[in-house]
């Protein structure tokens, strides 16, 4: 074989090696972290703008719900609004979940099941087991977040209310019924220190506010909700959505009165620290 022929053969081989067809059974991927964030934020928005970075994954979820006749095609738009929440809750109930486990906020097991044959799940979230921390019940994810904030502040918190406490405090309006929510005592803290604590909690992934008696039937304390905790009660989910919209997490949906930070989830904080 001459040099010219050999060169042509090598070029053909190289071209063939450079083009590798996608497998016939390639499956799409849904980013769970993005889907869960959208499920908290989108229902609180005044419009149907998708959450940044979540549209493609939410579309996969909505298409799967539509295929199961749980969501009308008109709502398959990448916006995880109230109709999508209702459809996802119906999916959770079809799997045998009840109560807070069927709130419409995607969990790892239900999302994996929904994606069978349609998509795989990446960036999975889990709250972990329930544990006791500083005398109250929280989950492992919330405990890790609190420990990170305590480490940054070089102080330990006094927790006056934990998570998974349905009916524990009527003034809480159900926010503590599920996971991811704590109240922190401000006894002995100056107002400036309280603000610093709120800022630090926000920096590690909490939606947090300093609460005062003028706002409701409670004493001074700090209220913190772990963003993207998949055990959040619906009222806590709404507080997260309002936090991202620059609101105070109260029924009056007033402007956020806390220190401004770059809003992150726990997982996003971990990725940069």
Image (cartoon, rainbow, N blue to C red):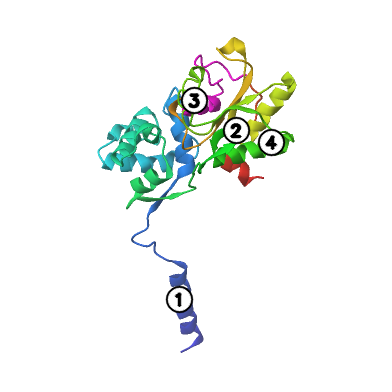
Query: Which is more N-terminal, label 4 or label 2?
Result: 2
* Mark closest to the chain's N terminus, 4 or 3: 4
Q: Which residues, given as a range, are shown in magenta?
A: 236-257
Q: Residues within 10 Å of mark 1 (few under 14, many from 20)?
A: few
Tell me whether the residue at label 2 lies in contact with that at label 4, contact meaning CB atoms closer than 8 angstroms: no
Find residue 22 and report its horizontal and vertical position in percent.
39, 61
Q: CB atoms at circles 3 and 1 under 8 Å apart?
A: no
Q: Nearer the viewer, mark 3 or mark 2?
A: 2
Q: Secondary structure at mark 2?
A: loop
Q: Is residue 254 magenta?
A: yes
Residue at 41% x, 28% y: name it.
Answer: 48
Badge nearest the viewer, 2 or 4? 2
Residue 45 location, x and y as percent?
46, 25
Residue 128 higher or lower than 71, as above or below:
below
Q: Which residue is mark 3?
A: 175
Whole-Å distance between the Cαs marked 2 and 4? 16 Å
């Amino acid at each position: 074989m001459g040099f010219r022929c050999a060169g042509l053969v090598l070029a053909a081989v190289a071209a063939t090696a450079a083009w590798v067809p996608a497998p016939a059974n390639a499956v799409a991927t849904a980013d769970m972290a993005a889907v869960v964030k959208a499920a908290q934020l989108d229902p609180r928005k005044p419009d149907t703008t998708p959450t940044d970075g979540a549209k493609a994954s939410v579309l996969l979820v909505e298409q799967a719900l539509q295929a199961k006749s749980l969501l009308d095609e008109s709502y398959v738009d990448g916006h995880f609004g109230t109709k999508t929440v209702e459809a996802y809750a119906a999916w959770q109930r079809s799997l045998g979940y009840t109560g807070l486990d069927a709130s419409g906020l995607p969990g790892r097991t239900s999302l994996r099941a929904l994606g069978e044959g349609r998509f795989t799940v990446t960036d999975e979230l889990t709250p972990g087991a329930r544990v006791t921390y500083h005398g109250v019940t929280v989950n492992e994810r919330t405990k890790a977040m609190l420990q990170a904030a305590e480490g940054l502040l070089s102080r330990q918190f006094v927790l006056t209310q934990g998570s998974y406490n349905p009916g524990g405090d009527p003034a809480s309006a159900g926010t503590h019924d599920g996971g991811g929510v704590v109240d922190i005592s401000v006894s002995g803290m100056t107002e400036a220190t309280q603000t610093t604590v709120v800022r630090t909690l926000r920096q590690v992934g909490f939606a947090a506010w300093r609460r005062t008696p003028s706002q409701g039937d409670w004493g001074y304390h700090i209220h913190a909700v772990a963003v993207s905790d998949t055990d959040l009660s619906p009222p806590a989910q709404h507080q997260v959505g309002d936090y991202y919209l620059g609101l105070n997490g109260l029924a009056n949906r007033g402007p956020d009165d806390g220190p401004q930070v770059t809003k992150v989830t726990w997982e996003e904080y971990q990725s940069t620290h």
